[in-house]
Image (spheres, grey):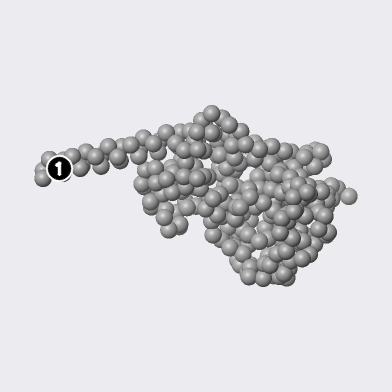
Amino acid sequence: MKNFLIYLVKIIGVLFLSLVILDGLYTLVFLQSKNRGKIETVFNSGPKKYDVIILGSSRANNHFVSQMFEDKGLKTFNFGISGSHLFETSLLLKLMIERKYKIKNILLDADLSIANFKQSEGVSAKFLPYLHNSNFIKEHFMSEEDFDALYYIPFYRYIKYENKIGFREVFYATIHKKTNVLDNLGFYSLSKNKKGNMKNDIRALKPIQNKYYEEIKKICAENHINLIAVMTPMCSNTKGLDYFEKVKKIYPEIHNYENAVEGDQYFSSCGHMNDAGARLFTTRILNDFFIKK
């Protein structure tokens, strides 16, 4: 029995040591990664200067044409991330400040995401390789239910989110395989020829006092950044469009552009404009906020 217990302890010890080594190796790879996604690009970057940084979900990523800002002499990058919520947007901004980014203006998509303060697991997982390397990330995740397991159990976060930060991603990062996420200054154009669902129902959404939006406002105020928060267009065939006015009642400073672009020909799906629609909308934003009359 004694020999069995000794053998069992050895097995557990070897397993634990293996997890520690794997955790260290995976983390080391992510600490060198700069060309696969927006989160690791920011984390592994140094000080930068921008006239305009675009933040938000796919409704930022697909709706603001970065090059059009650049054409007006505004150094710009679209850091919008499809599928993200304000949980991730706030944290990404914290990392930019931590890396001493100098930002004049932040253009923030703040509409549908105002209705929740939950994390988007698929996007938030991209921050987890750096959980032990940033107090901002640690503190941001500290209130999550599984924080202790993520933080204290070696390799647990890589196992739980294997499809996002597991072996496949580590392998591609190791061989420096690029993605198209950083192309076009971060803007991702949707084709006018591929039509998604042109009906939508957002009546179940209820805007709230969103603590992560409040964080973003506070960070901008403390760092003398001009925050331009907007609600972006949605197709007219949407039930519950009064949602945008409800957001406006809670946060009057958020500019409502829900109907700034009309016509199905400008939409790839009900909630996302195609390239032509994005260019029309970006022109409107440039004229309203950045081009001196």
Residue placed under numbered mark 1 in the picture:
4
Q: Please tell me which residue is depicted at 77% across the width and 61% down the height of the picture.
A: 235
> Residue 272 at x, y = what percent?
72, 54
Work out whether residue 138 can be spotted.
Answer: yes
Number of numbered discs: 1
The three-letter amino acid code for the residue at tag 1 is Phe
In the image, taking residue 250 as reference, residue 141 lies left or right, namely: left
Residue 32 rendering spot, x and y as whole percentages: 52, 32
Q: Residue furthest top?
A: 175
Q: Residue furthest right?
A: 293
Which residue corresponds to the image point at 69% horizontal and 37% vertical from the top-left?
183
Q: Does residue 226 show up?
A: no
Q: Nearer the viewer, residue 179 or 87?
A: 179
Residue drawn where x is 78% and y is 49% of the image: 192
* In this picture, residue 291 sits left or right of residue 253: right
In this rendering, the answer to whether 291 lies above or below 211 is: above
Image quadrant in which you'd find residue 146: bottom left
Q: Which of the pair 254/191 is nearer the observer?
A: 191
- As drawn, 273 above or below 3: below
Q: In the rendered image of this protein, does residue 94 appear above or below residue 23?
A: below
